[in-house]
Image: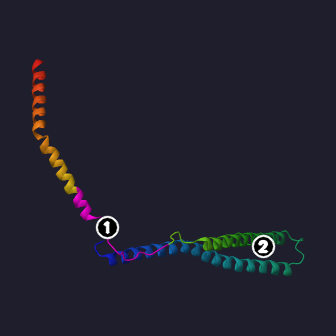
Amino acid sequence: MPERKLAVEVINNVVNSLDAYIRIKRKSYASNQRIYLEKRITLVKDSLAKFEENLRDFRARNSIVMQSPDLIMRQDRLIRDVQILNSVFIELTKQLELAKLDEIRDTPILNIKEYAKDPIEKSGPNRKLIFLLILLSSIFLSGIYFSFKDDGMKTLRRLCDIGKLLVGKR
């Protein structure tokens, strides 16, 4: 860039923006997963407590369950519902712990060792050196061209004459 200070500000802003983007995207996925699991565990825990309460109330009202097949089926359904919700609760708790570990483990990929500084002297292409090399090359190539110009034209004419002779003999 033509302005040194502007170049420094631009590159530092690009680095900071990239760092912020990486931190937010990587952290947000793990955080969103953890937040979802926490909400889901709360809902399942409430449902589990409700179903356990229903089972407890059922057993308290129906102390002699074995005499009625309908009561046995109803008790089995309540037990099954409690077991299913208990399994879901355990699985969600495991996933929550894994999500917490992922959230902690999510460290940014971009490690900034040093921010850009205003350069003391220009670090871009050395225009004086490039100009000098082009000038010397053109002088050298021009000298070669003019020194062999007459010999080159003679050689070219001879080749054309040979070509005409070969074409004419066919």
Which badge, 1 or 2, is on the more N-terminal residue?
2
Q: In the shown orientation, is residue 55 left or right of residue 102?
A: right
Up-down: is 109 above or below 169? below
Corner quadrant of residue 5: bottom left
* Residue type at numbered disc 1: Gly
Bin the neighbour count of mark 1 within 10 Å (Cα to Cα): few under 14, some 14-19, many 20 and up. few
Q: Toward which corner of the image does residue 94 lie, by quadrant? A: bottom right
Separation (CA) of disc 1 from disc 2: 78 Å
- Helix, strand or loop for the magenta stretch, by majority: loop
Type of the residue with mark 2:
Leu
Q: What element carries label 2?
A: helix
- The x and y percentages for residue 136 are 20, 54
* 68 and 81: which is toward the camera: 81
| Residue at 28% over, 73% down | 2
Image coordinates of residue 151 in percent, x first then y, are 12, 36
Looking at the picture, tell me which residue is in the foreground, 50 or 45. 45
Which callout, 1 or 2, points to the residue nearer the camera?
A: 1
Judge left or right: residue 14 versus residue 84.
left
Q: Name the residue under label 1.
A: 124
Residue 153 shown left or right of residue 80 in the figure = left
Asked if the magenta segment contains residue 64, the reply would be: no
* Viewer-side residue, 99 vs 42: 99
Quadrant, the C terminus: top left
Q: Is mark 1 on a helix, strand or loop?
A: loop
Q: Mark 2 points at which residue?
A: 78
Would residue 117 be found to the left or right of residue 38 on screen? left
Residue 126 is a magenta residue? yes
Front-most of 45 and 126?
126
Q: Quadrant of the N terminus?
A: bottom left
Q: In this view, does 29 lie above or below 154?
A: below
Give x and y (percent) for residue 6.
Answer: 33, 77
Magenta part of the chain: 112-133
